[in-house]
Image (spheres, rainbow, N blue to C red):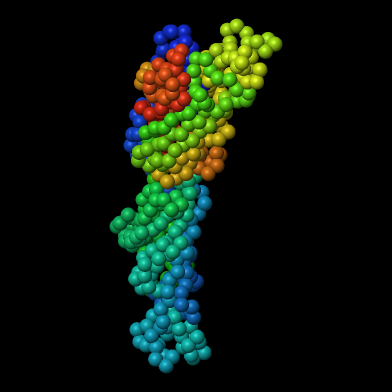
Amino acid sequence: MIKKLLMAVAGIAMLMGTALAVGVVGPSVAGAATPPTNYNCAIGGTVTFKSPGISAGGALTAATSVTTKTTAALTGSGCSTLPIKITVASATTPCPQTNGVPKAGDPAACMAQKNGVYAISTKPNYYNTSAQYATNGVSDLQAALQAKPPKTTVDGVAVTLATSAAAQVLPGGSCGTAAGFRATGQAMSGTTPVSNFTLLACLTGDSGPNTTGNFITDISGSTATIATATLGGSSSLALSLPNMGCAVAGAVTFKSPGLSAAGSLTSATSVTTKSATTPTGTNCSGLPIKVTIPSATTPCPQTNGVPNSGDPAACMAQKNGVYAITTKPNYYDTDGSFATGGLSDLQAALQAKPLKTTVGGIPVLLTYGAAAQVLPGGVCGSAVGFHLTGNVSYKTASNVVGTYTDNACISGDTGPNTTGNFVTDLGSSTAIIASGTIGGASLLNVTFNP
């Protein structure tokens, strides 16, 4: 993955036999546990009860169920501007009766008559009494949230609120002087849980005939009909997104036969370096991140098919007394070629195809921002490598949801005449480095926006 990048300075220093300077300063903790980014969204909205609304006496219907509809808007840093909509179905209750006559003690709605005939003859069920709301409100809400979990976005990341439990909140609780409900569960990215959540819905004001504007007062009164209730006060949605600090290990494979002082010949105008690194640790994917970096080859300077003096050794190669540059005029993978073009090759590759991984099950793109070399004495210790920074995006590159830092440290190597030390072998006159080992202080940190 470091083709040409690593030695734009280090390669020159080695070839000249000079001391290497201290490299890039950056994050130095690999695989460190990182706290999540927390979000607390204030909620405002309206709960609309089935017409005419909640009352002590209730209302009649022929239906076996009625619905309550809620529209809740979220506000706060990272919170969605789109409303959450919830529809709660509640079963109606048959009016107890004998021969079409309601029994004493039934809700007032059951006693209603029309032209001297009890209305229960055509509308035998009652709904929206204060008593029903107090008895079944929590179970109805929980069933609705489990049947169709609400969806929202947090910092641009889509989540589904899979509810596991709901409870009533009475005055003096987390809603202050108001009443309401509290739902808890898992925020899901697709089928993967990413965070616990708490949804607090506080019913403060209300509207409707004979209401006072205070939900608690009116739900316990005998004359009010509550058509709508106001969500506000301490209403909130609290959850988090899981950040990660991953240790990274893998390998970078150079174009065969590999890096060497002499280089190799080809008729191609470009060659590729391939890398696969696996981030491991809390919230890390455990799956390889693969990168392919094209690099332009360099024509061997020649005159009439004869290489010029001072060309790389590969350009001097002959086959049956004929210089090989007649059929393979370009060289690649020399130590000297690492002195130029490295950063631009890496930048072009990452801009053309951003890295992909998951953070706690959330798929993200690691879009390119900047790259710099890491020399021995820097964050890679005695090794060399590179330091990347950029934005974390969700689904599309334009949907930026966080930032990342990536250190790739190349320590060991493999290939003919290698010693297992990448830094040593890159300056060798005999080693051919087929692959480099990424490890040591290599890391990938991802942080969602607060």
Residue 290 to residue 346: above or below: below
**Is there any visible trace of residue 47 in the rendered image?**
no
The location of residue 274, given as percent across then percent down, is: 50, 31
Residue 78 to residue 27: above or below: below
Residue 423 to residue 237: above or below: above
**Is there any visible trace of residue 276 in the rendered image?**
yes
- Taking the spot 39% from the left edge, 58% from the top edge, the residue there is 163
The location of residue 300, given as percent across then percent down, is: 62, 15
Q: In front: 316, or 239?
A: 316
Please give the count of numbered marks on the rendered protein.
Answer: 0
Q: In front: 320, or 183?
A: 320
- Taking the spot 65% from the left edge, 10% from the top edge, the residue there is 306
- Taking the spot 46% from the left edge, 62% from the top edge, the residue there is 148
- Taking the spot 42% from the left edge, 61% from the top edge, the residue there is 145
Q: In front: 448, or 26?
A: 26
The location of residue 415, given as percent across then percent down, is: 44, 23
| Quarter of the image where the C terminus is located | top left
Q: In front: 87, or 131?
A: 87
- Tell me which corner region of the image, top left, top right, bottom left or bottom right, holds residue 223: bottom left
- Tell me which corner region of the image, top left, top right, bottom left or bottom right, holds residue 380: top left
Left-right relation of 294 to 86: right
The location of residue 124, given as percent across then percent down, is: 45, 83
Farthest residue, direction left: 172
